Image: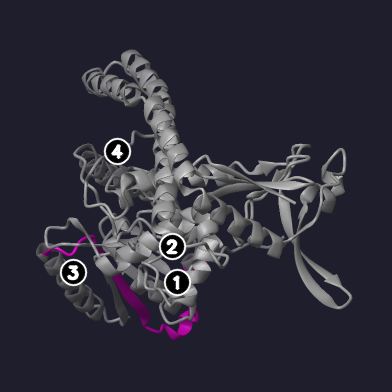
Amino acid sequence: MGNITIIPARRQMGNNVKQAEKPKLRVAAYCRVSTDTEEQETSYETQVSHYTEYINSHPNWQLAGIFADDGISGTNTKKREQFNKMIDECMAGNIDMVITKSISRFARNTLDCLKYIRQLKEKNIAVWFEKENINTMDAKGEVLITIMASLAQQESQSLSQNVKLGIQYRYQQGKVQVNHNRFLGYTKDENGNLVIDPKQAEVVRRIYREYLEGYSMKTIAQHLEQDGVLTGAGNTKWYDSTINKILRNEKYMGDALLQKTVTTDFLTKKRVKNNGVLPQYYVEDDHEAIIPKELFMQVQEELVRRRNVHRSPSGKKRVYSGNNCFSQIIVCGECGDLYRRVHWYIHGKTAIVWRCISRLDPSSVVKVCKNRTIKEDWLKDITVKAFNQILTGKDEFLHQLQENMTKAICESDPSSAEGIQLRLDELQTELIRKANSKEDYDAIADEIFRLREEKEKADASARSQEDLKKRITELQVFLKDQQTAIAEFDERMVRKLIRQIIIYQDRAVIEFKSGLQITINE
């Protein structure tokens, strides 16, 4: 075997590797500042000037561009337009080397940092970090980069924690922050306080009103689109999910629940619902309300009622629908299931009828119901008859309503909820005082959660009584104001005043929300 001469490999750099030609290296610089303060602005301008002179001072280098992002967070590269443009130029073969001040200026995310370094390295493009004196094309470059990038990530995490502590402090002070530009119904005054936008507030009131009248969220969204009403973000398209958020947002009654969500990853900024991971802060009467508290709580109860859907005798769920005023209120007197609206086609003609779901879906019940099918026109007729029947016996029914009102008032017990609230206020003080003792803190927290549940039940009972009194008052007003018999069917009256209609073989019982019942015999 002859002599073996080892010819060492030349260090490759840049897209153009024809070393014989020794072309100038096309060198680009990347610089970034973290804030937009005046001092940093100067630093930004200085960096641009520095790299322009520095690259031009090397006879074997050629300036391939200065890429600078100003005032953007460095925890990820999603919004760094100049950085992404520079990477594109590298991938296109227009840059051979990148110079940047430090790793923390290039990336504060280990994953992003290594991703781009390796991506550029595959193209024989070096990144040189001045502060750390690291060239990624050196053998030790990537090991050092991994270490330095990890340190940079820790710095970013520390900054994120500082920001989070600042927000937490504002929460503890009860300071509410809202992006009012997308918040339907409100804007901000010169002091940053939430104030009502009268035109948008009417839209919010309409949504709450229509929901309590029985319309589904999808139908409300369709109504708003048909009328050309804009969303809080200024869009013409409405979604039922948007209606849902508006109906559940406590800010519309003037309160504010703070820290509803928490950040689970400081790098991705991913936020999830706060299910007790961190404390929440509830601020009462923070700003002017659009929706009265009583009305807001009625909507919350209606949300729960619709979520607890009707079940068939066999236990099968019946999904809520509010598209028709009779939906969910026509009940079978024989089996207890709901009636459903059906289009019948007989001898080439269409008829709209209502049938017990147990007959329409025999597989969902143990025994098929044989209760009668009823025409929708008949339903309309009996509701008109029911209204006229109470109008005919106005004095008698007004007396009965007054008795119902007296009973509702007697059954109210506001002291129950008030007593629980007093104890909750005491525990709040203890919770702050014993925050450093985990055992005491946990015991107080458990007691608070238990009392909150009790108070919710007491409040729900009180609201139920208040709702009954309101329904009684509504029917009283109707009886006093309506001087003549009703000639035509009125869908809004059904939604507003009737709770349910029970269908039997020989009669129908109309139950009003005020507690009155009218029987219409066949």
Of tags 3 and 4, the one toward the viewer is 4
Amino acid on which disc 3 is placed: Tyr
> x%, y% of residue 123?
51, 71
Alpha carbons under labels 3 and 1: distance apart: 28 Å
Q: Nearer the viewer, mark 3 or mark 2?
A: 3
Q: Quadrant of residue 313?
A: top right
Residue ID at (62%, 51%):
320
The mark found on residue 282 in the picture is 4
Mark 3 → mark 2, Cα distance in angstroms: 27 Å
**Residue beneath disc 1:** 13
Residue at which label 2 appears = 137
Q: Secondary structure at mark 4?
A: strand
Task: Answer with mark 3 or mark 2, whichever residue precedes in sequence.
Answer: 3
First reached walking from the N terminus: tag 3 or tag 4: 3
Between marks 2 and 4 in the image, the one whose residue lies nearer the viewer: 4
| Element at label 2 | loop
Where does residue 189 sit, x and y in percent of width and height? 15, 62
